[in-house]
Amino acid sequence: MKYDFDTVIDRKGSGDLKHDLLKKLWGREDLIPLWVADMDFAVCPAIVDALKQRMQHPVFGYTGKSADFWPSVVDWIRTHHQWEVQAEWLKFIPGIVKGIGMVTNVFTEPGQKIICQPPVYHPFRITPQRNGRRVVWNPLVRRGDGYYDMDFDNLAEVCDEDCKVLILCNPHNPAGLCWSRETLVRLADFCYEHHLLVVSDEIHCDMALFGRRHVPFASVSEKARNNSITFQAPTKTFNIAGIVSSYCIVPDASIRERFFSWIEANEFDEAPLFSSVATVTAYRHGEEWRRQMLEYVEGNVLLVEDFCREHMPQIRPLRPQASFLVWLDCTALHLQHDQLTDLFVNKAHLALNDGEMFGPGGEGFMRMNVGEPRAVIRQALAQLAAAIG
């Protein structure tokens, strides 16, 4: 079956954040929203059909997970990431950012430190801080080709006895990096030796692009396996972020007992009715849709690269190795933060995430969501080129 990713779907009036928050955040509504990290593609028809079928039953009462919920997750991870996960390692959580908040409260005390590697997804900073913890930066080092490396020398300098957790973005958001096995092994060794629990956010793990492969952190070594909590979900890949279906993977028995008992005590592991339906259908029947979607996203990435090269060379897009997010290097425009925001919002009429929100190293960058019909990407690029011109 050939799936349609070209049709422009009008989401206005559906309650979507992309449109509903434009006025509040940017003071105007005449913007192409390329900021919130969900895609504007119609969801895989198999998922829609499964939800419709369940909705034929007129009662939406308390409902447990289907018998195939965890088997579908285990099979998917084995097939796509060559990682043998046991069902007992798995627990439903009501969202990955919420999971970070849970880890913060279970494994750290107020005033203790959590390490993040900016520029990185901003809730890694916001969630610990709002829970009374201190955030320590271990900034990534940008190479000449635009990609990033971890700075292990700096990590050794900033890590002290008050540091209890390191939050890893794998694949990395906003830069779209698939971390190498060698890097992850080195990180696992360091964190194990320094008693740093690693929380690996792997929500984009099923969206590797251009022949790249995702390496689950906990799969690289015994030290990684015994000192980590991994978060995954089908939500980004299958564009079902409005259906909560996240889960954690905890191989180590002692960490698992401590974390899972707290989750169970607070009943955070009770999945909403449609989570099981959407997750099982995605993992059992969504593979061809996923493949075609990734091919389409790759085409959009190439379109952005070619357009910038030909019409606005001042902007250098970093080709993502995973996800539908493109990290735009706008530093050659030589604009201050407010000027860069004004260019995109008030002149180009585009809503993107500005780089500064991702922490040190994000200055002069913008994050662009290319999970859009190609016509929308072309229109956005044309408006930006006209604004720069």
Image (cartoon, rainbow, N blue to C red):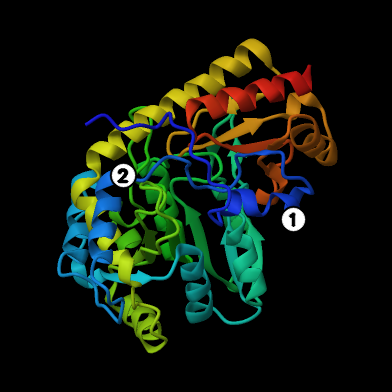
Cα gap from disc 2 to disc 1, whole angstroms: 31 Å
Q: Are marks 2 and 1 in contact (CB under 8 Å)?
A: no
Residue 209 in the image, given as x and y percentages of width and height: 38, 32
Quarter where residue 291 is shown: top left
Residues 259 and 166: in front is: 259
State the mark number for residue 288. Answer: none
Please give left or right for residue 230 compared with residue 47 in the image.
right
Please give left or right for residue 272 compared with residue 137 in the image.
left
Residue 337 in the image, given as x and y percentages of width and height: 81, 40
Residue at 49% across / 26% down in the picture?
A: 374
Instruction: Relative to 58, say whether 381 is above or below.
Output: above
Work out which residue is located at the far bottom of the displayed protein and give it. Answer: 265
Residue at 40% across / 57% down in the picture?
A: 189
Rendered-image quadrant of the C terminus? top right
Crowdedness near tag 2: few (<14), some (14–19) or many (≥20) residues, C-alpha within 10 Å: many
Q: Which residue is mark 2?
A: 44
Amino acid type shown at disc 2: Cys
Residues 329 and 62: in front is: 62
Residue at 56% across / 57% down in the picture?
A: 15
Rendered-image quadrant of the N terminus? top left
Q: Of marks 2 and 1, which one's residue comes earlier in the chain? A: 1
Residues 299 and 122: in front is: 299
Instruction: Relative to 267, say whether 151 is above or below.
Output: above
Amino acid type shown at disc 1: Lys
Q: Secondary structure at mark 2?
A: loop
Q: Which residue is mark 1?
A: 24
Instruction: Relative to 335, say whether 180 is above or below.
Output: below
Crowdedness near tag 1: few (<14), some (14–19) or many (≥20) residues, C-alpha within 10 Å: few
Please give left or right for residue 194 compared with residue 386 in the image.
left
Quarter where residue 339 is shown: top right
Residue 162 in the image, given as x and y percentages of width and height: 60, 74
